[in-house]
Amino acid sequence: MIATEKVLEGLTQPAWDVARVREEFPVLRQTVNNRPLVYLDNAASSQVPQVVIERGSRYLQEEHSNIHRGVHYLSQRATTAYEGAREKVRRFINARESRECLFVRGCTEGINLVMHGYGRKFVGAGDEIVVSAMEHHANIVPWQMLCEEKGARLRVIPMNDAGELLLDEYEALLNERTKLVAVMHVSNALGTINPIKEMTSRAHKQGIPLLVDGAQGAPHLPIDVQDLDCDFYVISGHKMFAPTGSGVVYGKAEWLERMNPFLGGGDMIRTVTFEKTTYAGLPNKFEAGTPAIASQIGLGAAIDFLNGIDREAAHAYEQELLAYATEKLSAIEGVRLIGTAREKTGVLAFVIDEIHPHDVGTILDQEGIAIRAGHHCAQPVMKRMNVPATARASFAFYNTKAEADALVNAVQKVIEVFS
Ligand code: C6P
């Protein structure tokens, strides 16, 4: 049976069968420090299911070749697989056309592509870019670089203490100088789900395009870019069960057609002379050089995997797990949750009185529990919440209540060690 076509029996039942889904993720079977691995760092990078591993190795064993260039058999097979992955992405996010789905290495590269392609062409002196107070550095720094270059200004949507954006203040920031709103779908540091459809509609009322940093949205939520009506939606494959080096920029064709290319080189041109170069059509105009072929084919296989499970049940299960862990963790004296929005995905960030998050992370690691500790590439969030850093557990649909218990017990142990 072809790996990516494997039917994932048992995963489409209404009740989520977590034991069954865990079987698909070989990395979860190991022990760390003589304890079963408890992997709660999914917001940094999620794990890869067997079907994706098999698809990647099948490419390397049977199909490896450069794409778009060769007339030979292997190149055509690799091209078919690569373009097949693009079509899978298109369907997954419900883009109108596959040429609106550009392959990039991840969100950071994707946002930089839009900054160079859109920003350097359409933003000028005195213009404004609106970002939010909860953005990841990947959706701040490129826009700051642009503002510096162009003499433009970065405006910031504020948030409340729970980590929810203030929509009236957002709307008040928009004006004729605003050239782009760049906002995350889901916060990696707080878990907040932002009301993207509403935010897009408010921006569009004033003719302003909107970019969504979908790094933490695509792995957990159904994405329909036509329904959201966003102008750009950027995805990192390694956060949605695909290999590193895979990712997507969705852009409306009418923008992508008008934008400057990002990188110059092979495969993105129509003609080259020393006097002038003309560019290829979409999507090639934005895909210079040899891309991460195996990784993008892996992303296609990860999408097959996600299509093979009941995503609604997976989401409901993640929400249940979040509620369970939130209740238990917040009941511990000395623990304070950072990020308590009403709409959240499975991110549980916290601080413990008098104990540095790095110490929490290190002690949890000794228990075989992987979390992330630090500023999560969101220093402005730390400043806003008045903490130097947080410890962050982030859940995926393969995590269990027993693992949430292990987290809670280990946090209690940390407090005992320091008391
Ligand atoms: N957040 C985290 O532990 P890259 O690294 O390019 O795949 O994705 C960058 C990025 C952009 N936006 C958001 C919302 C993100 O969460 C991330 C990556 C990881 O939270 C690593 S810092």
Image: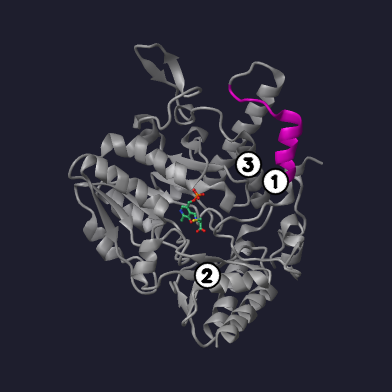
Q: Amino acid at mark 2?
A: His
Q: Which residue in the structure is indicated by mark 2? A: 358
**Looking at the image, is mark 3 or mark 2 earlier in the sequence?**
3
Q: Is residue 63 within the magenta segment?
A: yes
In the picture, measured across the screen, residue 142 lies left or right of residue 192, that is left
* Residue 15 drawn at (x, y percent): 70, 68
Can the viewer see residue 22?
yes
Q: Which residue in the structure is indicated by mark 1? A: 52
Circle 1 — which element? helix
The residue lying at 58 percent from left, 49 percent from top is 238
**Looking at the image, is mark 3 or mark 1 earlier in the sequence?**
1
**Looking at the image, is mark 1 or mark 2 earlier in the sequence?**
1
Q: Amino acid at mark 3?
A: Gly
Q: Which residue in the structure is indicated by mark 3? A: 300
- Where, quadrant-wise, is the N terminus in this rendering? top right
Q: Crowdedness of circle 1 by 10 Å Cα count: few (<14), some, many (20+)? A: many
In the picture, measured across the screen, residue 237 lies left or right of residue 190, that is right
Residue furthest toward the right? 1
* Residue 181 drawn at (x, y percent): 32, 50
Can the viewer see residue 164?
no
